[in-house]
Image (cartoon, rainbow, N blue to C red):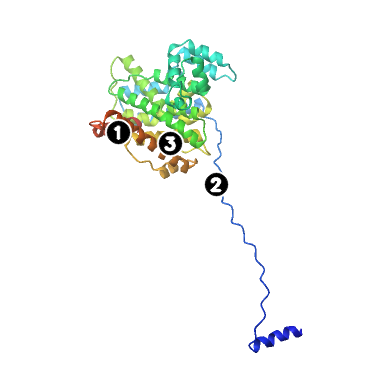
Amino acid sequence: MFKGLKNVFAGLLGGSAPEPPPARARPVPAAPAPVRPAPPVHIAREGPSEAELGRRLDEHCARLGEHFEGRDVELLLQALRAGGQAIIRQPPLAAQALLTLLNRRSYGMDEVIRLIERDPALSQALLRHANSAWYASSFGAPVISIRGAVQRVGTKGVHAMVMAQVVQGGLSRPGAGFNEMATMVWNHMVRTAPIARRLARVLGGGAEDAYTLGLLHDVGKLVLFDRIADLRRRERRNLDLPSGFVRIALREVHETLGGIAALQWRLADEAVRVISGHHRTPPPEGFDPLGEAVFLAEKIDIAAQRGEELDLEQLWADGGLQGPRERVETFLAAERARENEAEAEAERADGGPGQGAAAGAAQAQDRTAQATG
């Protein structure tokens, strides 16, 4: 007690006050760990049934019939309403046999090889597919045997090749100025497929499945052209269809017709669902990597053909996308760099840019807008 009073008097008289006791160091709180968003969850869903797609097709045809008149319009809508096998061209027998085998739960590679070797068209298509740039970048040397090609591409790659043959074999000549549109639709599908395959790696889906779905996403448009061609043969004349009818019909019915084709070809539920709803209106619930890959791949190709910039924020909102947008942005930057390098290499090989490129590009943009709009 006396020591404490002494210290007080010393302070009052100007003496030096004692040093305060050292303060205890408080622990520094650790910085909170960054919160990473949970990855989107892929929810497996069944595709629409044949009855559901048939009901949709009836509704589409009824709306078209309300807005357009004419005998040929009625004939075409009646042909579409027949549905199922009546409107979907079946694959060649060799392709049917191979698809049936691939749909089985178990089969041997030798069975696959034997079926392909029996059909020259399938053999040639498989070798072209196995030696494409996608596989050449990983395997290098070209493959020359069917066995080696099957081993290189796997069963998913074989399935993609068969579906490409089926669709290309069904490419019709509808006449009356529609031939070019049908060809442009096919070319758009062919361009979309490899983009979807590369995007699937970014979004977490199966690359070969995405390739097949990208290749088939607009097959409903080819079904419509095939019906026009069939009516043209039956009537032995070009059809007299009102201005704008085919363009609007393509927009209205192609997803539903594509889903019906996928069912007739006995594709998986996921394929039926993606093809019949690839415009994502309305967006499906949950994360759907294959559907998002096809949706984005189509938008990327259309924008490239029209010379337009992609608005990813708007695409994410319109399509209800849940995939990692920043990874897609990185992917697009790499795609642009690859395209620029390819263009520069082509110019170096040609000795400079070609003549009339701007006019040709403008014409291509107009045609693309009609076929893919």
Q: Amino acid at mark 2?
A: Pro
Q: Residue at x 44, y 41 (%)?
A: 330
From the image, tell me which residue sits under label 2: 37
Q: CA distance from mark 3 to mark 1?
A: 19 Å
Q: CA distance from mark 3 to mark 2?
A: 22 Å
Looking at the image, tell me whether mark 3 or mark 2 is earlier in sequence order: 2
- Farthest right residue? 1
Looking at the image, how many numbered discs can be counted on the residues? 3
Quarter of the rendering occupied by the N terminus: bottom right
Looking at the image, tell me whether mark 3 or mark 1 is earlier in sequence order: 3
Q: CA distance from mark 2 to mark 1?
A: 39 Å
Q: Tell me the element at label 2.
A: loop
Q: Tell me the element at label 3.
A: helix
Q: Amino acid at mark 3?
A: Leu
Q: Residue at x 52, y 20 (%)?
A: 151
From the image, tell me which residue sits under label 3: 296
